[in-house]
Amino acid sequence: MQGLLLAGRYRLAEAIGSGGMGRVWRAHDEVLHRAVAIKELTAALYAAGSDQEVLLARTRAEARAAARINHSAVVTVHDVLEHDGRPWIVMELVEGRSLADALKDRDRMDPAEAARIGLWVLRALGAAHAAGVLHRDVKPGNVLLGQDGRVLLTDFGIAQIEGDTTITRTGEVVGSVDYLAPERVRGHDPGPASDLWALGATLYTAVEGLSPFRRTSALSTMQAVVDEEPREPRHAGPLAPVITALLCKDPADRPQAAQAEQMLAEAAEGRRPSSAQAHVPTQPLVLRPETAAHPVAGSWPSGTTPYPVPPAAAAPAAQHHPVPIPRRRLRTLVLVVALAALVGGGTAVLLQKWDQGRRQDSGTSQSAPPQTTPSTSPSSSPSASPSPSTDNADGLQAGWVRVDDPYGFSIAVPDGTWQREEFDEATHQVDYTPDGGKHFIRVAVDDTPDFSTAHEHQLDLDQQLQRLVDYRRVGLEPNTYRDCPGSLWEYTWTALAKDTPFPGPRHAIEETYFSREGVEYVIYMSSPEEDWARTRQQFQTVLQSWRPRAG
C-alpha cells in the first residue's frame, strides 16, 4: 500500500503507528506540499456487516469531534476522505512519540514533567469540553510528545459529541478499561469529570510506571476501578495529591478543570498543591446533639476502611463520631490515618488491627482492663482521670507525676493538668492531654499484632501518611527499647483548619516495640511544631518512665 495515492493528492509513505482499530501513515500532500498523517481504519476490513457500520460511524464521529476543537494541544484534522468504502482521516503530523512509548523506555517520568504534560492534556480537554466533545479514551497511548516539546491529545475515535445519538450498542463499554471512570463502568452517562478521571489514571501511570487499577483480566480491572483504591503512589512527589483528587470515585468530588489546572501548575513548579486536599473524600460525621456547634471533619486514607473509631474525647465540645458502620466480628481495622480528626491536634497516628470480635464474644478476662492499683483508684468511667502518685522515688523530674492506667500500664505525665481521655475503650487506646488535644500522649496496646516487627508496621504506616499535607519523614529506624525489638518514627505535616481547632505545622514521634510476650505497645506524642523542642524532651522522659502491664 506504500506509495498509494488517495483522493488524487495524498501519497502514503510509511506506516508510523498501529493499534487494534487502525494504522497511521506518514504521507505527503501533493497539493499543499506538506507532510501529513493519515489514519486508516483497518478494523473495518475484518468486521461483520453490522460491526463495520459501527466502526465507520465511529471514525466519522472522530473526524467531526476533532474538527470542532480549535486548540494547539489537539491534533488538527485536515480532511476526511473515502477509499475502499472506508473513511480515512488526514491529520496534522506530529514528529515524536506517544507517552506510552516513552514510558516503555523510561519506566516512569519525573513528577514535574508529568505535571507539565498533564497541564497540556487538561487544556486540550477543556477546549474539547467547551466544544461539546467528550474524549472518552484519554490514556498514555493517546498523548503525543512532540520532538519540539509540544504535548498533544489525539484519537477522538470514541468521542461523544453533545447532541449526537450514541453509536455504541446497548451494554457496550468503549475505551481502555484501565482508564475508564467508575461511573462509566457502572453504565452511567459520562461527563467531563470522566475525562479528568482518565487523566488522573494517565498521570499515575506516568510517574509510577504502571496502571493504578490493572489486574489480570478486563473484568477484574473494571471491578478494581469501581471498588478499590489505587495503590499509593510512591514516586509522584508533589503530583500525588493531584492524582488522588482526580481519582475520586464520585465525579462530584473531583476538581473542576480550572482547579485541576492550578494544581498541576503548582506541581509542575515542584510545589505540593494544598488545595488538592479539599477533594480527598472525607468520612461523614454524626455529631452528638450537645456538640453540633463544634463540627470537626475527618478524612480517611485510600486503601483503608473507616470502621467507627471514637476520636479522642479531648473535651466535651470536641467529641464527634463517624457514621456507624457494622463492625466485622473478626480482626478489624479500627485505627486509621484520620488527619486532624483523631485528636483535636490533627494527628495521624496509627493503623492497626485489633481482635475486637474476640473481645466482644469471648467473655474472657481480655475483655476488661486490668485492675488498677489502690493508689490510683480511677473511676470505672472510661473518661475518668487517674489520681497522680506523689511518689517520685523512680527519679521523675520535678512536677512530673506517675499515673497507673486502668489498662494496666504505668506512665509519667509532665504535670497534674494532663488528663486521661479515652480514645477507644474497645481497642485499649488512651490519650493524656493538658489542653483538649493540642498536645498529647497516646498509648496503644495490641495483643495480636498484624506485623512481625515494629519496624515493618511503621514502614507500612509511613506509606499511608504520604497523603498528609506537607508530610515529611524525619526519621524511621529500627531500635532496641527495654531490651526488646522496636522502631522509632518521627515526622511532620500540616494540619488543616477545616479538620481541626489546632491547624498549622505539627510534629510527632512514636516508639513502637514488641514485648517478650508478643504484645505490641505504641507510645506516641505530638504537638505544634513551634513547641517541638520541649515536646521532644518530654517524650524522652515519658519513655524512661514507661512500665508495661504486668504479665
Image (cartoon, rainbow, N blue to C red):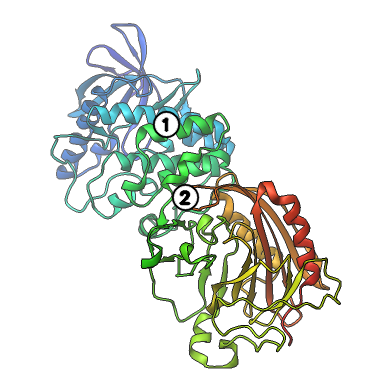
Q: Position of residue 283 (x, y in %)?
A: 41, 59
Earlier in the chain: of badge 1 and badge 2, it is 2
Q: How many numbered discs?
A: 2
Q: Give the camera-side residue of 467 and 493.
A: 493
Q: Give the camera-side residue of 500 and 155.
A: 500
Label 2 near label 1: C-beta < 8 Å? no
Name the kind of residue labelled 2 in the image. Pro
**Residue bearing mark 2:** 212
Q: Residue at x 27, y 31 (%)?
A: 129
Q: Give the camera-side residue of 374 and 536.
A: 374
Q: Is residue 17 visible?
A: no
Q: Secondary structure at mark 2?
A: loop
Q: Give the camera-side residue of 163 and 93.
A: 163
Q: Residue at x 21, y 21 (%)?
A: 81
Q: Nearer the viewer, mark 1 or mark 2?
A: 1
Q: Secondary structure at mark 1?
A: helix
Quadrant containing the C terminus is bottom right
Q: Residue at x 43, y 42 (%)?
A: 200
Vertical side of 401 occupied by 273: above or below: above
**Residue bearing mark 1:** 261
